[in-house]
Structures are given as structure tokens and as C-alpha cells.
Amino acid sequence: MSDPDVEQPALSIVDNSQKLRTLLLPSEFLKNFGQALETIFHKLKYLRLLDLSSSTIQVLPSSIEELKLLRYLDLSRTEIKDLGNLVNLQNLELDDMFWFKSSTLPPRIGKKWHILPGTLHISKLENAENAEEAKLNEKEGVHKLVLEWSNRDANPHDLSDEERLLADLKPHSALKELQIFNYLGNSFPHWMTNGQLRNLVGISLKGCSNCRILSLGELPHLNELYIKGMLELEKWENGDYNSLCRLKISNCPKLRELPKFIPNLRVMKIKKCSSLKALPVTAFLMFLILVDNPVLENWNEAMLQLISINDRRQQVVQQRLSFISLLEMKVIGCPKLQDLPTNFAPQKLEISGCPLFSTLVIPERSRRLQHLALSSCHDETLVKAIPKIAKILVALSGEGSMRSLTSLKLLSIQGCSKLVKFQDEELPPALECLLIGSCSSLLSLGTFGTLKSFHSLKDLYIEDCPLLQSFPEDGLPNSLQHLLIQNCPLLTKQCGNEDEQGPEWEKISHIPDLEIDFIKAPPLPKEKNKAWYRVFIRGGGLKGNEAAESSALA
């Protein structure tokens, strides 16, 4: 709708659709409802969603109280000054709103949001004045609060005003979730640091780039904490974080210190924290991602004594290894880490750019390993050590076997320049997908029994292995459904094609889906948190629990 006058179209809708539940009137221009709002509020009794954004409205007529079923109201980009009596409203959208003209917060925001929980998102806070008039500390019905400043350069003269503004926006103690974006004050207000918001379940801090110390006080129900782009943050102080289950920290280059102990943490992701040397001690960690942390060197692995009370009110002391619950780990670009934790038994393990690693999973804890991905192994220390289980990848001298990895389903080996040959009967028996790429010295996939007997193998991907020129003598398994060969000129020549068959063609002719040196399509944009090996996986991908475990790390 391009005409800014929407009065007549709105009245026409009222006359013909009195049981309407959703009313949207999009327009490129500032909308003028004229006298239509009174009619809308009187007659459309069933409205649940109403969009009044980008309109000339400044005051909601008192007749809006007649919309007893209204749950969602969008007043973004308006000059609204009074929100009236919004009894049952759950969600109020105020993005990019009125402050560029009115520069005040409507004092009646959420006044009667006590019946149903709601979300309040306030943006463009750099233009706000008289924030204390909003009296957010009286709005018990606001359960999620988003406070957002525009992304801008800091002005030293405005920092004290910014700190005062945030202090005036103190929410009610019943608040469950707090998000603060692009706040440039040097410190957070007392209502954030002294544990006043004891019902908080989630906190997100993004772009709060001038705060040096983070102190959150006692938050007994805090379940999730996300910190991103706090460029000056140096220390997150100890506190009561016994309920914290999910922690994600990224792009905090000066962060040196985390709380010493976070007992119930289940998911932890730390990325681009270039001053952090040690992780917190945890007891029940299940998913861990570490990416581009150049000085991280200490896992803080420990034997813990956990004290609990049983049904008879007796004290029970339990010993527990700190990483024993870990199911999935990704470690990328952490060159100072000496090795993996000693005692953990992962199902999925991905390692790239960690040159000091010399061992992986100890044999007795390796049996549930299903997915293993190694990349950028610049020397032979890591690739020789799927510890004692196998000295794989360098013509192994028959010392041990990967066949003890009875649960391993996906093995991906990338950028391992020392890999020369797979030993016969070396690979895990349950393997379903094998990916080999950028192994410049690879000459042989084995001579006999390396692949043929693997009745579970469905997908084989071989890329950028210029010296490889043949498959094992006894060929490939009948279970193989998909074979990709890319940038392996000698092997491609030996295979040939259906019209000009080479000496290796007979070994691959039974495979339904062959892709041999096809022309690649332009690469898709990179997606966040995708493991590098997943770009190879076609078709069904991960299934069931495996997919669920992967999503926890996203």
C-alpha cells in the first residue's frame, strides 16, 4: 500500500471482517489512520495482533481497552507518548521508535502487564531522556527486557549519562531474561551487580565494549549467559553460578579471568578470547567448543569431590573427573594447548590447528567415539596418535589398530601432509563415512582388506591427494553408495569413465553415485558454527541423537 492515508482502507476492512484476528497495513510512507482507530477498537473485538508501526499516532485512544484479546502490538517508528491501558498485552514492539523526536520514555509502559508475561524491546536508547519516568521497576509483567543502543563510537562526555540512563532503567525483580546491546558505559549499575534480579534465567551482553569487570552477584536461577564483543572486559568475577548450564563468550580479546568453578555447566563455547589462558573447572560439561584462543593453555582438569544429601538426609561424597561427561568437543586454533584432557570419552571430536597435541583419546575411553575429524596436522605427532590404538597415517609399522574404535562412524582427515599409507585392516569396523583431503603425501589406501570388508561404509570422499593413484587391490565394499574424487589427477586417470574405462574402473563401477573431478559450483556463504567436515556430507547427514547433539553446539 503506497498511499499514506489508510483511513478508508482500514474502515473498509472493519465493515467486512468484524471477526478479524490480525490486522497489518504495510506502507512505504508514514501512515495516517485518521479517525479509523476508534472504529477499529470498537468493532474488531477479536483482534489479537495489530500493526500500527510507521504511523502518525501519538496517543492510543482509551477505546483500545475494548480489545480484550489483543496480545501483540507493533508501535515501531512512531511518536507514541501514552500507551493507554493494555491489560492483556504480551508483546509490545518499539524498535526504532519515537526518541528522535520526543526523547522520552512513555511513563505508562507495561503498567498493567501483570496478568500475562510480556517482552519489552527498547532501541535507540542513545536518544532517550527521563528514563526513570518509565518506572520499569514497577512493571512486574515484563519478563524479558531488551535494552539496545545503536552501534556507534563512544563519546567520553556521554558515558556518565549513559551509565545514569541504564541505572534508571532498573527492571522489576521478577524479570526472567535481560539483554543489553551496545551499551558504552564503563560499568554496569548496581541493580545488575549486586544480585537484585534473583529470578534471572538468561543474560545476553553484546557490544558493551567499555566495561572492564563483569560482576553479576548472586543469581541462583541463571541458566544461560552469552557475552560477545566486550572488547575491554578483563575479568568476570566469581559468584553463585550453580545453575548456569550454557555459557558462550566470543570476541573478548582482553578477557583473562573467568570464575574458578562453574559446577553444572553443560555447554561452553569460547571463541576469539586472545588473552584467556585457563578454563573454569566444571563437573558435568557435555559440549565444548574452543575456537581461535591463541594463549589458552590450561584445561583445569581435576578430580572433584561433590557433596550431596540423599533421601535419608545423609551427606554423600562422590568423586568425579571433571571432563568425564563430555560428549562432543571441537578445538580449533588453540596452539598453546599441550594436549587433550586425559580422562574423557567423547562421541565426536574435531581438532584443527593445535600443533602441540600428541595424543587423542586413551584406548579404554575410545569405544564410544563416533565422529573424528583431524585438520591442519602440520607434523606427524598427532596423526600418529590415536593413542596406542593406532599409529595411523604414516605407514604405521603395525603398531596397534584403529579397529578398537568400534563405534566410530565418521572419520575425516584433512591437511595431514605426513600421511603416506593406510595399513591393511586398519580402519574402524563400523565406519559409515570416510573423508580424506589435502594429504599431499598419500600414496596408498592399503593393499588388501583396508576397505572391502567394511560393510557399513556408504560414503567415501577423496580430495586434493595428488600422489594417490589406486584403490586397494580387493576393491571397495558393495555397501558404498557415494564416491567423490576431486583434484586427484593420477587416481582420476586410472579410473577413467564409462566410455573410456581405466584400470581402476572395475573397482568403482558398482557405485550408484559417482562424482569424479566434476566442476565445482561457486561456494555458498559460510554459516556460523559449522564443522569444516560437514560440507562434504551429502544426503541424509546426521540422524537422530547425533543431530541433536550437534545442535547443542551451534
Image (cartoon, helix red, strand yellow):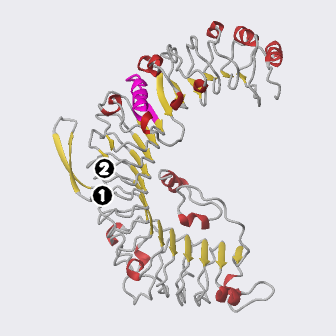
Q: Secondary structure at mark 2?
A: loop
x then y, percent, for residue 346 = 39, 62
x then y, percent, for residue 419 = 48, 84
For the residue pair 98 and 68, the one nearer the viewer reads as 98
Answer left or right for 50 relative to 500: left
What separation in Å lies between label 1 and label 2 (alpha carbons)?
8 Å
- Residue 352 sits in which quadrant? bottom left
Figure label count:
2
**Amino acid found under the numbered disc labelled 1:** Ala
Circles 1 and 2: CB distance less than 8 Å? Answer: yes
For the residue pair 296 and 371, the one nearer the viewer reads as 296
- Residue 204 sits in which quadrant? top left
Residue lying farthest front?
Answer: 157
**Residue at horizontal 43 percent and vertical 35 percent from the top:** 157
**Amino acid found under the numbered disc labelled 2:** Leu
Which residue is the site of mark 1? Answer: 278
Looking at the rendering, the stretch of residues picked out in magenta corresponds to 159-179
x then y, percent, for residue 412 = 52, 72
Q: Residues within 10 Å of mark 1 (few under 14, many from 20)?
A: some
Q: Is residue 204 above or below residue 20?
A: below
Q: Quadrant of the N terminus?
A: top right
For the residue pair 268 and 11, the one nearer the viewer reads as 11
**Residue at horizontal 31 percent and vertical 54 percent from the top:** 256
Which residue is the site of mark 2? Answer: 258
Which mark is on residue 148?
none
x then y, percent, for residue 17 = 79, 16
- Residue 527 sits in which quadrant? bottom right
Q: Residues within 10 Å of mark 2 (few under 14, many from 20)?
A: some
Answer left or right for 487 relative to 313: right
